[in-house]
Amino acid sequence: MSETLKNSLARLPVTLGDIEAAASVLAGSVRQTSFDRSRTLSDILGADIWLKFENLQFTATFKERGALNRLSALSADERRRGVIAVSAGNHAQGVAYHAARLSIPRHYLCAAGHADREDREHTPAWRAGDRRRRNPGGSDRSGRRPRPRQATDLHPSLRRSPDHRPARAPLRWRCWLQCPISMCCWFPSAAADSSPESRSQPRRSRPGIEVIGVQAALYPSMYNLVKAHQLPIRGDTLAEGIAVKAPGRITSEIIRALVDDIVLVTEQQIEQALSLLITIEKTVTEGAGAAGLAAVIANKARFKGRAIGLVLSGGNIDTRLLSGVLTRQLAKEGRLSQLKFDLVDRPGQLAMVVAILSQSGANVVEVSHQRIFTDLPAKAVSLEVVIETRDRAHLEATIDSLRAANVVVDVGGH
């Protein structure tokens, strides 16, 4: 390794020593989550997939590590005055939970306007005296954060402070690491082999490990900064935990030095990854937590045959949103479909359609039979049927059976 690179690494605000110091502070207070190989995902994606289950922390997010580490560094006077936290949800939950454990007053725990219902409602569950405010955008009308007098602001990102050191998810494996971009400010420094010799070396001197950050394509802020692009930043993303418009200076510095690449994933890829983690691994993640797997799905050829560590950074997702994602995925896979029929209004037509569906092995979920509110002729009826099939091949066979019986059918959304 060149002297120039050594000097560059030495100047970074977070080192492996910092992370190991934080780990000693957190020992016994945060869960040492499992790091397991997914045999099924490995088979599907043609790679050796390992999952780090940070979504199984008590608050369902890795961010309670940083929250506890910062709270533990407060002086006695700072503890007495209390703390303030502003976040989309995960950071505030970590602060609320561990501040309660340490008997530190929580003056305000503000949820930004884009925080989902699950995050907003879980945050006060640990409050025991919290004064909580929902604050769209995380600032008051003057553009400043609401701040009780003398309270310590626990920022969700890194700040240059000797007492504020990030926590780690211990992961020692020679692999390519896929992380949501929010984790890239500290994760590269912790990536190491199990051998003592390699653990003492900066990651850049061990070419067997490549660290890749992942951002939602709707919010490519760090991608733009690192790659000198100007892709638009807009819209509502499922990965709201990494929906950042302006990257932090310290985080950007670390990513430039230690992260090998940043890739973008679409909303459809995030949805597919989230669905796969639930159906295959039986584990719930939020959109940002599924971003690493989404990146593998989007780049199968690039990662084929590689050993890949994916960090499931959080599991806080609105249950209604989760239900919608799973239902949409069933539709994309041809397992849930809406069939539309224009039928002659005479006895037996509905029974005929249902009989064909039954003979084809399709399950009828919903039926809408409409005579009044339709533009069809008076002697016609509109019929809509939602069905379940095993897969797309089964759906196509079912449609073929209907058309063989001279039934005109339109498949909605396909």
Image (cartoon, rainbow, N blue to C red):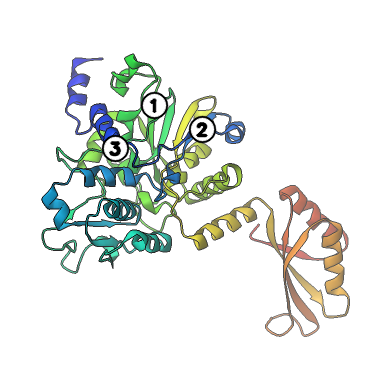
**Pointer 3 or 1: first along the chain:** 1
Choose between 295 and 405: the one closer to the eye.
Answer: 295
Indicate the quadrant containing the C terminus: top left, top right, bottom left or bottom right. bottom right
Indicate the quadrant containing the N terminus: top left, top right, bottom left or bottom right. top left
Choose between 189 and 324: the one closer to the eye.
Answer: 189
Give the image location of residue 157, x and y in percent.
25, 46
Q: Residue at x 75, y 73 (%)?
A: 383
**Pointer 3 or 2: first along the chain:** 2
Q: Which residue is mark 1?
A: 210
Pointer 1 local density, CA inside 10 Å: few below 14, some 14–19, many at least 20: many
Give the image location of residue 146, x and y in percent.
18, 64
Q: Nearer the viewer, mark 3 or mark 1?
A: 1
Q: Nearer the viewer, mark 3 or mark 2?
A: 2
Q: Which residue is mark 2?
A: 36
Mark 3 and mark 1: span between their CA atoms? Answer: 16 Å
User: How many marks are shown on the rendered structure?
Assistant: 3
Pointer 2 local density, CA inside 10 Å: few below 14, some 14–19, many at least 20: few
Helix or strand or loop: what does disc 2 sit on? strand
